[in-house]
Amino acid sequence: MIIEVSDAASDRIIEILSSADIQDAFLRVGAVEGGCSGLSYTLVVDDQQAEEDIILNKKQFRILVHANSIPYIDGLEIDYEESGMLGGFTMNNPNAKVSCGCGASFRMANYRGDVKKCE
């Protein structure tokens, strides 16, 4: 299980985790049904670890991935880009065959997921 995180994304993740009012916070990364392409990425601050979680130790933080998400996000590259007054995480997923315009939703060649309107 490999997830690459750029320096810019690492800096932003460290900021987010340190500002969270949670002791021993980590970033949970995953994929869930939904979004305009069928599967959507999840990035959330969490402190609850499940038995099925895979732990990825980065230099100054931890990423947890539930085993169910691994087939969808193995090899994921997370970056963070500033654009004027806005900024956001971007995902480069080698498993995605189609991605929506905003980059938050994707589809795989062998799994479409449950397509839903983006909110």
Image (tube, rainbow, N blue to C red):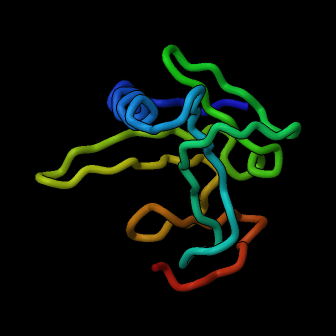
Residue under the image location 54 percent in, 35 percent down: 22
Judging depth in this view, the residue of 51 and 67 nearest the camera is 51
Q: Which residue is drawn at 65% across and 50% down?
A: 30
- In the rendered image, the quadrant that contains the N terminus is top right
Looking at the image, residue 25 lies above or below residue 87: above
Tell how many labels. Answer: 0
Residue closest to the far right: 51
Task: Work out whether 2 lies above or below 116.
Answer: above
Query: Where, by quadrant of the figure, is residue 103 drawn?
Result: bottom left
Residue plotted at (75% across, 50% down): 69
Judge by depth and name the residue closer to the eye, 46 or 58: 46
Q: Which of 52 and 104 is in front in this view?
A: 52
33 with respect to 25 (left or right): right
Examine the image and state in which quarter residue 9 appears.
Answer: top left
The residue sitting at 66% across, 30% down in the picture is 2
Instruction: List the single residue furthest toward the bottom.
Output: 117
- Residue 42: percent from left, percent from top: 58, 55
Q: Could you tell whether 94 is left or right of 89 in the image?
A: right
Q: Position of residue 40 (x, y in %)?
A: 59, 64
Quadrant in the rendering for residue 113: bottom right
Q: Position of residue 32 (x, y in %)?
A: 68, 63
